[in-house]
Image (tube, grey):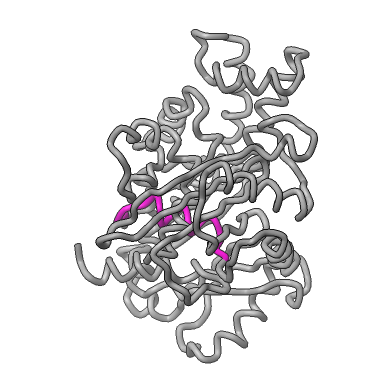
Amino acid sequence: MDNSFKKIISEGLKGLSGIFASNKKSDEALGIDIGSSSIKVVQLKKKGGKAILETYGVLALGPYGSTDIGAVTNLGPEEVAKALMDVIKESNVTTKFASISIPSLSSLIFTITLPSKISEKDLPKVIPTEARKYIPVPISEVTLDWFVIPEEAESFESEDKTKDIVQSKMEVLVVAIHNDTLSRYQEILKKTDLQSDSFEMEIFSNIRSSFGHDLAPVLLIDFGASKTKVSIVESGVVRVFHVVNRGSQDITRNISQSLSIPFGEAEKLKRSVGLDSRIDPKVCDISKLSIDYIFSDINSVVLAFEKKYNKNISKVVMVGGGSLLNGLLERAKESFRVEVVYSNPFLRTEAPAFLAPVLETSGPEFAVAVGLALRQLS
């Protein structure tokens, strides 16, 4: 692989990966992914240049909010901290220094185009001004970070553009995170015995744990409980970020309402049946309604990208607990007509061979937590 391409991938992964990034390095690392319906933790140890899997675990947040497993919660810092310490105890986590993910839903990700004549030292003045066009709250209420997309990546956009046109502009990837979100996570940490000065947006953790040296555009679909997050990543750089306002909880709720059964029972049906009509045609049809809506929305995003950049998506990578829905992989292949794979983040770790089948199956759910832990060891 060309060294310039490697640089693009490396810079793309590091550019916005560490808002308030830690300078501390340790031989042990703990990645914590606090979602809307569960908390995932992964502890890795660095030995002989390899990331050794020491332990991992997941805990549903529903019971902490007096609701069902699989339900979206809106817990306060006190309850989240208690759940976090419980999953750490149950998983036999030993390290106290952690890296925590910031949900993509708590932020904005967008690309702005600037004249290439603007120097790097002027960006701190220019970008906040330009970012105001995209941010619906006062700029003082958010924390901004940005990354100038390397010229090598920009030059891929179109073969028929002249070099002068390509070099007359530069693209900058910008992230805005609401200060209240950062304060919330700091408050959660204060209520635990964990130490962390490192936060990272979940999308960058997903890229680190799920991608190889992919140069062509890849569609990353993160199936969460409340929303489905969609990213198009090229050479390690996020080109498009989009949120579909449907998630795995919507499927459960539809099953519950359609069959007039409790949410908890509907959740069990969803997990056992999914999109397999051979098990239960009615549950399958109900599940398909939500999935088809999500895939239709995603296809619109893909078509817009392909039209703008004159290039096609090469592959689809699925992450998140909701991606484990029975039959979803086959449905995705029908919808997108390209290679569709599950993320297997544990491939980047060393673990006992007998755990391989379990880790491969559960991998998509732990992509963020693994990515966070890997970052601490790098």
Q: Which residue sits at x=48%, y=27%?
A: 328
User: Left or right of 303: which side holds 37?
Assistant: right
Q: Residue at x 35, y 35 (%)?
A: 355
Q: Nearer the viewer, residue 43 or 275?
A: 43
- Res. 234 image quadrant: bottom left
Name the residue at 48% across, 73% down.
Answer: 171
299 inside magenta stretch: no
Residue at 57%, 59% (x, y): give it. Answer: 100
Residue range in magenta is 199-214
- Residue 239 lies, in percent from the top left, at 48, 60
Task: Name the foreground residue: 324 vs 114.
Answer: 324
Above/below status of 352 relative to 243: above
| Residue 223 % position (x, y) | 56, 40
The answer to whether residue 304 is seen in the rendering is no
Q: Position of 24 compared to 245: left or right?
A: left
Residue 251 in the figure: left or right of residue 338: right
Seen from the viewer's position, the closer of residues 235 and 17 is: 17
Seen in the picture, residue 265 relative to 65 is either above or below; the reply is: above
Which image quarter: residue 158? bottom left
Q: Quadrant of the C terminus?
A: bottom left
